[in-house]
Amino acid sequence: MPVFAANLTMMFTELPFLDRFDAAADAGFAAVEYLFPYEVPPEAIAERLARNSLEQALFNLPPGDWAAGERGIAALPGRFDALKSDVDKALDYAAATGAKRLHLMAGLADPRDREAASCYRRSVACTAERLADEGIDLLIEPINGRNMPGYFLNDFGTAERLIAELALPNLKLQFDIYHRQILHGDVAMALRHLMPVTGHIQIASVPSRHEPDGEELNYHYLFEEIDRLGYGGFVGCEYNPRGQTLDGLGWFKPFRRS
Ligand SMILES: O=C(O)C(=O)[C@@H](O)CO
Ligand SMILES: [Mg+2]
């Protein structure tokens, strides 16, 4: 049975951020993820995790100036020094929360731009090597251009090739099924093919990005497939609830922590 992580950036937004940990645990989740923890002290998050016996599945390294439109800096030439201090900051949060995987966002850049490609490769390699010292996996995630226009890493093949070429054991794929379906389709075959390099999975219905309970994808089948493939990681619920978060958790009943 997959172990689901509530995404606290998108779920339980009826509540202040720290209270979402309590709500996720009460709803039966054993783990949580979110995009960015950096507005809150690491000790406050650690306290909520411990209080609720929750595992911290994942979060993102700092993304640059999000409010100004940045979506990561790994592929942006000239930002390498900033990336190094971002990594230190993320590692402080990982140490406090026990997170064993971090997602590095690429940024907005033309994937055909050679300077951006070479900068991205260097950023990914250096970050993965730094995280390896702490026993942490680095994840890269292809994101579709409808949700994030101009995002550099917009192709699963590119991610797969980079992971193979760098051959760093802690560099893995963040397989977001929502993005996969929009970018390429063929989700089940891609899960089979990419499972050896997959370090984290995320889900949402397509096309609405709501609860994984209908529309274009058969999640009942995909959850069984994820189990059949022996996946031992977390499945992040990275979706926008249609209404109140609890009202949309019917799909989750069979998977609740008892
Ligand atoms: O957008 C997604 O999908 C993510 O997983 C985020 O971490 C990046 O915005
Ligand atoms: Mg995602």
Image (cartoon, grey):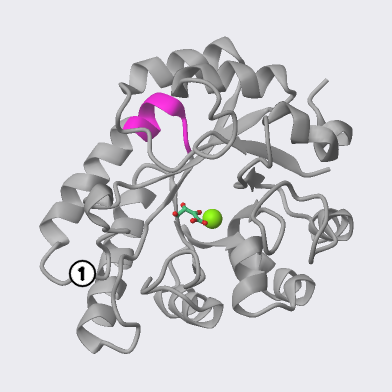
Q: Main secondary structure of the magenta part?
A: helix
**x, y (%) of residue 223?**
82, 53
- Residue 214, image quadrant: bottom right
Q: Residues within 10 Å of mark 1 (few under 14, many from 20)?
A: many
Total of numbered circles in the picture?
Answer: 1
- Residue 13 percent location from the top left of the image: 53, 30
Residue situated furthest top in the rendering: 51
Magenta segment includes 83: no
Query: Label 1 amino acid?
Result: Leu
Q: Spot the residue most to the front.
A: 243
Q: Nearer the viewer, residue 90 or 67?
A: 67
Q: Which residue is mark 1?
A: 76
Task: Look at 37% across and 59% down and name the residue there.
Answer: 105
User: Image quadrant for the C terminus?
Assistant: top right
Snapshot quadrant of residue 52: top right
Looking at the rendering, which quadrant does residue 53 occupy? top right
Along the line of sight, the residue nearer the viewer: 44 or 173: 44
Q: Is residue 44 above or below residue 202?
A: above
The segment highlighted magenta reads: 93-99
Rendered location of residue 205, percent (x, y): 72, 56
**Left or right: residue 232 compared with residue 102:** right
